[in-house]
Image (cartoon, rainbow, N blue to C red):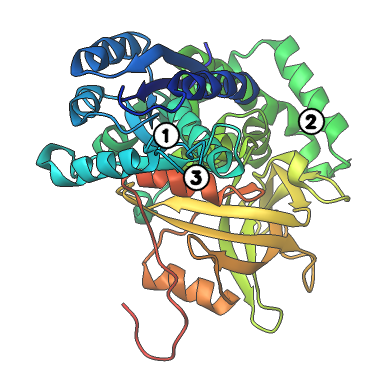
């Protein structure tokens, strides 16, 4: 079942103000109901005015019974603090909302903005609310200001709702020596509500791959061959074997309820199976299962959040080169990008460009099956959480046609760096310095488009800090 966001609404009023409070409430309910249908959230309004503390208690109990995740509290007119305090007993996240006055002269019709100010002040004054986050809104429900702010909130909270309760499987553990991928499963669960299943062994995956139904394996292999522009001879014999791993992981993910997988993709696949599974990772990512290479749980979590924030499928990359003259860095990985991200030359199935084993006769055996591609030009959002999941690197920019096509694998030259929330521009050298100064792990999750606004909102609700730009300088920065 789809994990849809539930938005509630209550309008606080005071009888003494003569503005048409019922018309304001009806307008809000009508437009938010339509927004829910368009954006994919469920809308649960409390009918009528909330005037007294008793009214607010009835509203809060009804909204809590509906399971609302976000409660919009409209100061339809300035209301009582008792009503606000009662509504704040909900566990839902809250928004405080004011509407414009219907007249600008004569008797004050609603005093709605002052009501918003008072409610914000109550949350800042009373100790029990000082650490509780809220977002303010102003404007009628069809106004540009309200719509812009509310849609961002709905998208961010929808993304958080979709990953809350999700499961990430760590299959085989972290790749050997990659200590910067160490993580705390308790912190992941506490902040994001995401469980990490740590006991899945590669032996189990290998067994499931061998037992995969032949018809399913052949169907996947056929899809791979038809979607690739070319299949190199060194990869041809491994297409079915890669398809077996894909079939096994899909079945295991369905059985285990996994939304993400952190896969230890080497060295055992090389040593025991004579196989690389980069193309498998790319195809699983394409299907919406967030798969991170090398047992990187935090990157799998970051990819899940990126996918839902952007409504697209993402990928995981390293920074492998910098072009100082062209002001670009090369994002590269062995070949696990979603195939839809390739440029017009498409995807070639080939052997792993660097992974293999030296043979007794001195030759070097390369293993398939890798999706070799250059990433298509376009805007991208780069984001990865830190290992404690309490901060994130967030960068915008674009893949461009660089000075060359880069190293074999999944790759693209990236430039036009900007760092939210300020949008401050930066150079490639600034980006490298920021990564190093923050001692950031060597994986970077990314997705097409600009999802920074949604991510910034999500981070604020969660209390996740955004790492600041650290501009390059010749002196030591720690």
Q: Residues within 10 Å of mark 2 (few under 14, many from 20)?
A: many
Q: Residues within 10 Å of mark 1 (few under 14, many from 20)?
A: some
> Is residue 51 among the parts visible in the rendering?
yes
Q: From the image, tell me which residue sits under label 1.
A: 109
Per the model, the C-alpha gap separating discs 2 and 1 is 66 Å
Q: Secondary structure at mark 1?
A: loop
Which of the two discs, 2 and 1, labels the residue nearer the N terminus?
A: 1
Residue at 68% of width from left, 38% of height from top?
279
Q: Secondary structure at mark 3?
A: loop
Q: Is residue 170 above or below residue 356?
A: above
Residue 357, horizontal then vertical, whole percent: 59, 52
Q: Can you say which quadrant of the picture contains the C terminus? A: bottom left
Q: Secondary structure at mark 2?
A: helix
- Position of 344 with respect to 164 (left or right) is right
Which of the two discs, 3 and 1, labels the residue nearer the N terminus?
A: 3
Per the model, the C-alpha gap separating discs 3 and 1 is 9 Å
Q: From the image, tell me which residue sits under label 3.
A: 104
Residue 167, horizontal then vertical, whole percent: 41, 25
């Amino acid at each position: 079942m789809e994990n849809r966001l539930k938005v509630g609404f209550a309008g606080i009023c005071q009888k003494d103000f003569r503005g048409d409070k019922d018309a304001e409430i009806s307008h809000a309910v009508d437009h938010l109901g339509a927004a829910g249908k368009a954006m994919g959230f469920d809308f649960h309004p409390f009918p009528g005015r909330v005037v007294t503390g008793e009214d607010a208690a009835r509203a809060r109990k009804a909204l809590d019974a509906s399971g609302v995740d976000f409660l919009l509290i409209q100061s339809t007119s300035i209301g009582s603090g008792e009503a606000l305090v009662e509504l704040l007993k909900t566990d839902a996240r809250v928004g405080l909302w004011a509407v414009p006055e219907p007249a600008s002269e004569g008797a004050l019709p609603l005093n709605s903005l002052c009501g918003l100010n008072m409610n914000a002040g109550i949350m800042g004054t009373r100790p029990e609310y000082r650490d509780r986050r809220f977002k303010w809104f102003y404007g009628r429900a069809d106004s540009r200001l309200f719509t812009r702010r509310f849609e961002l909130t709905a998208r961010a909270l929808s993304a958080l709702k979709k990953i809350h309760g999700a499961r990430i499987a760590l299959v085989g553990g972290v790749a050997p020596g990659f200590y910067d991928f160490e993580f705390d499963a308790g912190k992941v669960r506490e902040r994001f509500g995401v469980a990490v299943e740590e006991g899945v062994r590669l032996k189990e995956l290998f067994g499931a791959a061998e037992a995969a139904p032949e018809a399913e394996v052949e169907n996947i292999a056929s899809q791979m061959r038809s979607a690739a522009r070319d299949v190199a001879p060194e990869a041809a014999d491994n297409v079915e074997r890669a398809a077996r791993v894909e079939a096994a992981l899909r079945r295991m993910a369905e059985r285990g309820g996994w939304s993400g997988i952190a896969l230890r993709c080497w060295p055992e696949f090389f040593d025991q199976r004579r196989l690389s599974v980069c193309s498998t990772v790319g195809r699983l990512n394409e299907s919406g299962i967030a798969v991170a290479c090398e047992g990187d749980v935090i990157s799998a979590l970051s990819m899940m959040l990126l996918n839902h924030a952007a409504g697209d499928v993402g990928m995981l990359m390293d920074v492998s080169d910098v072009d100082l003259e062209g002001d670009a860095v090369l994002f590269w990985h062995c070949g696990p990008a979603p195939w839809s991200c390739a440029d017009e030359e498409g995807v070639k199935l080939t052997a792993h460009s660097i992974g293999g084993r030296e043979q007794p006769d001195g030759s070097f055996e390369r293993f398939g099956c890798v999706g070799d591609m250059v990433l298509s030009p376009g805007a991208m959002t780069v984001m990865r959480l830190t290992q404690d999941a309490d901060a994130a690197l967030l960068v915008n920019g674009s893949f461009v046609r660089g000075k060359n096509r880069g190293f074999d694998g999944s790759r693209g030259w990236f430039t036009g760096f900007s760092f939210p929330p300020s949008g401050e521009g930066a150079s490639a050298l600034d980006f490298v310095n920021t990564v190093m100064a923050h001692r950031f792990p060597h994986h970077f999750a990314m997705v097409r488009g600009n999802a920074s606004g949604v991510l910034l909102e999500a981070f604020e609700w969660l209390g996740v800090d955004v790492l600041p730009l650290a501009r390059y300088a010749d002196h030591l920065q720690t």
